[in-house]
Image (cartoon, grey):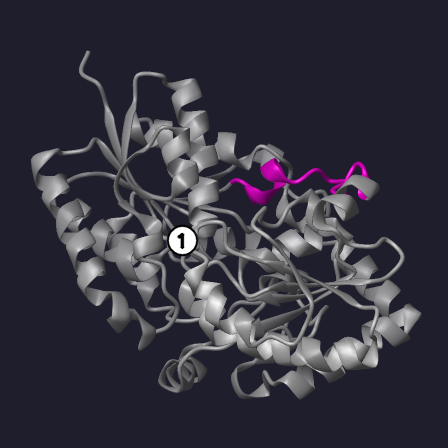
């Protein structure tokens, strides 16, 4: 029997992590598979032969992409050539829609089935993409229950499997030995810790970290014993941070561990919008969600975005559980003013932690990666059964309400 080949593409850090877990399960279920494509260090360790490293492609914003355009086009040409010459048996795409939807079109033209795992955020903006997905994608595998409802309404084959974060996070995710975590970071357990997490892409760090440090400086003046932990992107070089940190007046402890159990030493965090906000929620860490892109990108997004909040933690919660500071609102002074209530009002702090504790129940049961792998193999083996729901992925509480058409206020 000929070895079956899967081309897989994940263009950013969260996709790399989820892609790695998917590939591990695929190879466990079907050891003879050959998997190659675009991803990061985690996917390479899981057994993916990389044609291009995802760090070369990761960028946020419509204007910002021009700085990487040559590299992105080169990667796309390489993938297009592989679709024709290597003829993979299946293409698996993770998020990264501006690139991946173009790959889906090329694969569909060649008669190669396409599985899309982790949906583009069409429920938030650029809803018209669903027509292209219906045309080019064989099966959607989604991680939020409200996404399944949306695709079903548009007759797109879809399966909800739950969120893969639940495969990586212990439900009781606090550091097993807090003293060890504080010691590892050189922090004191006697005083609060503020986490700064400006994102995993170089463009995010350059846009967000300087203003986070301005806010941290104001907080340090108000609370001199406040400690600061900077989460640096594991895949980013020191040069991304060096010039920014040289100008910092805030005493920082830096870590490249990523968001994990050790992060639970943080009492409050400033977090770039994205999957990291869900990771913080699973750790029960109150946060302020931050986001900034070029002015042109933001102006265009304002015309297209259909939801009242942008942080995944707030979207999943269906309300603004934690504050968001976006674009022009994101200033050092505003960060300072948003943080102070967490330190000075115990009732507010406790209420936010209670709301964050509910997020876990909205993300489904552990095992999403294995469920997704079974769906991928069904398509690969030609056993795709059409739209369906996997009962074991159901959240323990009622699914997130359908807030997609009219926003949170009109249900």
The answer to whether any part of residue 375 appears in the image is no
Q: Is residue 214 magenta?
A: no
Q: Is residue 324 above or below residue 195?
A: below
Question: Where does the image place residue 349, in percent across and percent down from the top left?
Answer: 85, 67
Q: Is residue 48 above or below residue 399?
A: above
Question: At 82% from the left edge and 74% from the top edge, which residue is drawn?
Answer: 224
Question: At 60% from the left edge and 75% from the top edge, which residue is drawn?
Answer: 248
Query: On the rendered image, what quadrant is the C terminus found in?
Result: bottom right
Question: At 77% from the left edge and 54% from the top edge, which residue is drawn?
Answer: 187
Say what secondary structure mark 1 lies in: loop
Question: Where does the image place residue 8, in percent across and percent down from the top left?
Answer: 30, 40
Q: Which residue is mark 1?
A: 12
Toward which corner of the image does residue 260 lie, by quadrant? Answer: top right
Prevailing secondary structure of the magenta residues: loop
Question: At 48% from the left edge and 34% from the top edge, which residue is drawn?
Answer: 21
The answer to whether any part of residue 120 appears in the image is yes
């Amino acid at each position: 029997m000929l070895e079956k080949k899967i081309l897989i593409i994940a263009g950013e850090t969260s996709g790399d992590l989820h892609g790695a877990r998917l590939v591990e399960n695929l190879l466990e279920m079907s050891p003879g598979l050959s998997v190659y494509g675009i991803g990061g260090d985690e996917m390479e360790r899981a057994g993916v032969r990389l044609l291009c490293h995802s760090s070369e492609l990761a960028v946020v914003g419509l204007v910002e992409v021009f700085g990487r355009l040559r590299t992105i086009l080169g990667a796309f040409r390489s993938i297009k050539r592989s679709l024709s010459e290597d003829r993979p048996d299946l293409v698996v795409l993770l998020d990264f829609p501006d690139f991946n939807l173009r790959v889906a079109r090329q694969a569909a033209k060649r008669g190669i089935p396409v599985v899309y795992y982790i949906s583009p955020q069409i429920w938030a903006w650029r809803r018209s993409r669903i027509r292209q997905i219906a045309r080019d994608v064989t099966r959607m595998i989604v991680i939020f229950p409200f996404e399944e409802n949306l695709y079903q309404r548009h007759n797109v084959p879809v399966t909800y499997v739950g969120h893969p974060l639940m495969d990586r996070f212990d439900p009781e995710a606090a550091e097993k030995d807090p003293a060890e975590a504080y010691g590892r970071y050189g922090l004191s357990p006697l005083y609060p810790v503020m986490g700064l997490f400006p994102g995993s892409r170089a463009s995010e760090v350059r846009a967000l970290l300087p203003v986070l440090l301005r806010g941290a400086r104001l907080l340090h003046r108000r609370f001199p014993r406040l400690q600061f932990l900077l989460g640096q992107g594991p895949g980013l070089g020191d040069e991304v941070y060096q010039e920014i940190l040289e100008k910092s007046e805030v005493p920082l402890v830096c870590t490249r561990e990523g968001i994990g159990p050790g992060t639970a030493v943080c009492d409050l965090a400033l977090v770039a919008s994205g999957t990291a906000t869900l990771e913080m929620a699973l750790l029960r860490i109150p946060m302020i969600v931050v986001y900034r892109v070029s002015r042109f990108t933001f102006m265009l997004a304002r015309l297209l975005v259909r939801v009242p909040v942008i942080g995944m933690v707030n979207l999943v919660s269906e309300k603004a559980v934690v504050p968001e500071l976006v674009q022009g609102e994101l200033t050092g002074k505003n960060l300072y003013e948003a943080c102070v209530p967490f330190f000075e009002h115990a009732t507010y702090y406790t209420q936010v932690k209670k709301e964050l504790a509910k997020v876990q129940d909205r993300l489904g049961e552990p095992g999403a990666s294995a469920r997704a792998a079974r769906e991928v193999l069904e398509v690969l083996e030609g056993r795709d059964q059409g739209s369906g729901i996997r009962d074991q992925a159901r959240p323990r509480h009622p699914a997130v309400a359908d807030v997609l058409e009219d926003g949170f206020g009109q249900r």
